[in-house]
Image (cartoon, rainbow, N blue to C red):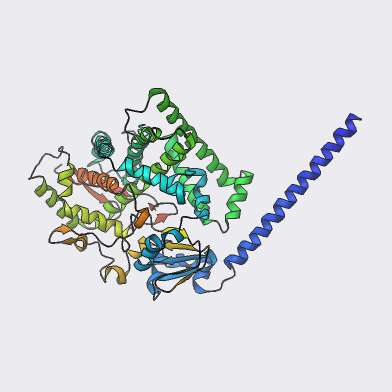
Amino acid sequence: MDSELSLWLSSMCSAFCFMFFSFTLFFSLFSLLIFVLRLKLWCNCEICQAFLTSSWTKDFDNICDWYTHLLKKSPTGTIHIHVLGNTITSNPENVEHILKTRFENYPKGKPFSALLGDLLGKGIFNVDGDSWQFQRKMASLELGSISIRMHAFDIVRSEIQSRLIPILSSVSGKDQVLDLQDVFRRFSFDNICKFSFGLDPGCLKLSLPTSEFAEAFDLASKLSAQRALSASPLIWKAKRLLNLGTEKQLKEAIKLVDEFAQEMINQRREKGFSDSNDLLSRFMGTTDDDKYLRDIVVSFLLAGRDTVASGLTSFFWLLSQHPEVESAIREEVERVMEGSSDIQQFTNFDQMREMHYLHAALYESLRLFPPVQFDSKFAQEDDILPDCTFVRKGTRVTYHPYAMGRMDRVWGSDCLEFKPERWLKNGRYIPENPYKYPVFQAGQRVCLGKEMALVEMKCVVLAIIRRFNIRVADPKQSPRFAPGLTATVRGGLPVLVQERGA
């Protein structure tokens, strides 16, 4: 009797599993059909065909350059990629409409949150509404305090003096190629980990060690971004459900990130956090929710690491192409620092504020090579943009800072030239309309870490150009970008380093 019952239960279990699998498969295929019908994957327009067949790669190394080409050809500076359901614009009036005028109608949206949800959870860069407003208010109070800005400055100065300068000196004059992008990524990762967790991963030590946490974080960021390249979100969601391929790798990488974050939280609780200045400690004074703490700190880790490294990499590539700009910065430094020949002297805040040309050069570099090349929102309701483009509810709407920096109609006929002078009037820096230059976003979502990031970049630039001559190994090679959340140059930035006066 027991054996018959066992056999019957086994049969029922098998039947149920078969029915469940069949239903899941049917539902997935049905959803895929709806997705295909909605996205019009059969679109035969020239743009969609070029995208689907990748024929654009015959003429362009980077998809951002192809988009720039299309946006330049468009009378309104706006295009629509039908197969992606994506409206892309380079029109400053549209950007202001999206980020300010109709801000409530253009949230990050669930599709975007789903892509980065496993990595960022409900952190500030992956949520909308009340959750975003609460986190932004709290982060604004913390990042705006003088004490935490001084703490960040001290971290950067220490990392420059103890690691960045020694590692550049170690290859100086040896005809040895150094990947400057890798150096900047290690530098910024050390800094943001110290600032966020109070932990020093030591990525920029002279031996350039491997960090398990850094590798896991890089892999998680890369694979999360690659989800957006799938023809349908159903593909990566199915792979995640079945724990296959890149989704399996992503799960394992995020597990390491989670374990590390939890270990840091536990250590802070054991040792106390009231006297610490790192972000984790300061946020722990406002909440006991470990998951929330993990999400917000990992979000800042992502934002503060890759953007600074990307901005510095592009800046030194441009500087290598334009030695006259490098000379002008050095002249300004000597003037502001009263002709000091002591290259060990570290520039202070007041001196940096007087370096208008340096500020203009950084802004000009970020205009041409923004670390975040595009940003997308999702329309909650039907809308009409200022250039009369109709936006249907649920459409992905993307503004493209990379393309905007290359638009004649936005920046003039010399838009492709690297000219810091365009930001100066009578020798003083004059800001531009933020919706013409949305490198740090604009409106209510303007980057909270903007000033801290600029100070970090200035510290690095000043420390390097006062001591070294940096030359790109292959000056004819233009940057080619790898797919990702931020602009990362394929193959890095190989350079030759020579100490000045050596």
Query: Where does residue 174 sit, x and y in percent of width and height?
Result: 25, 41
| Residue at (40% x, 55% y) in the render | 481
Query: Where does residue 447 sit, x and y in percent of width and height?
Result: 34, 51
The quadrant the C terminus occupies is top left
Task: Please say if 430 is above or below 125.
Answer: below
In-front residue for pair 370/139: 139
In this view of the protein, can residue 413 be seen by the observer? yes
In this view of the protein, can residue 61 be seen by the observer? no
Query: Where does residue 430 sit, x and y in percent of width and height?
Result: 20, 59
Instruction: Report the residue that reaches farthest toward the bottom.
Output: 75
Task: Please say if 395 is above or below 268.
Answer: below
| Residue at (28% x, 37% y) in the render | 148
Query: Number of callouts in the render?
Result: 0
Instruction: Report the residue that reaches farthest toward the left.
Output: 338
| Residue at (31% x, 27% y) in the render | 275
The quadrant the N terminus occupies is top right
In-front residue for pair 184/367: 367
In-front residue for pair 188/321: 188
**The image quarter in which residue 443 lies:** bottom left
Instruction: Report the residue that reaches farthest toward the right.
Output: 1
Query: Where does residue 486 sit, x and y in percent of width and height?
Result: 40, 52
